[in-house]
Amino acid sequence: MNLETLKQKPLFQMTGEEFIFLQNNLNNEVPQKTLDSEKGKKYVYGIKGIAKLINGSTSKANRLKKSGVIDKAIIQNGRKIIVDVELALELLKGCK
């Protein structure tokens, strides 16, 4: 199987074997950055994680996120939200 040809082929036209081959080979191409690999870093995930961090409600966490105060501490890809706890707390301290 040719990897370049499969990349151009629509997903709905692929066989299961072709799809699995593509998945396995693309995962090897993209370097995986693990967030937990950095020593001492702590993260919270999602709006509920932000709410837990500030000890508040999810609506307050949503407002905080939308305000932009902790933007530097947030990594977001689509709907997935990851927040660096230490950086977020530093940004919140500077905000007051």
Image (cartoon, rainbow, N blue to C red):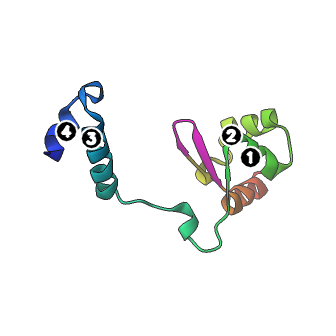
Work out whether 60 lies above or below 34. Answer: above
Q: How crowded is mark 2: few (under 14 residues within 10 Å), some or many (20 or more)?
A: some
Q: Nearer the viewer, mark 4 or mark 3?
A: 3
The Cα atoms of the two marked residues, 4 and 1, are separated by: 40 Å
Position of residue 5 measured from the top left corner of the image (x, y, whole percent): 14, 39
Q: How crowded is mark 4: few (under 14 residues within 10 Å), some or many (20 or more)?
A: some
Mark linked to residue 65: 2
Q: What element carries label 4?
A: helix
Q: What element carries label 2?
A: helix
Does 82 lie within the magenta span?
yes
Q: Residue 42 vs residue 20: left or right?
A: right
Position of residue 20 measured from the top left corner of the image (x, y, whole percent): 31, 44
Mark linked to residue 17: 3
> Which one is earlier in the sequence, the residue at label 1 or at label 2?
1
The Cα atoms of the two marked residues, 3 and 2, are separated by: 42 Å
Chief secondary structure of the magenta span? strand
Part of the protein shown in magenta:
76-83
Q: How crowded is mark 1: few (under 14 residues within 10 Å), some or many (20 or more)?
A: many
Residue 88 makes an appearance in the image: yes
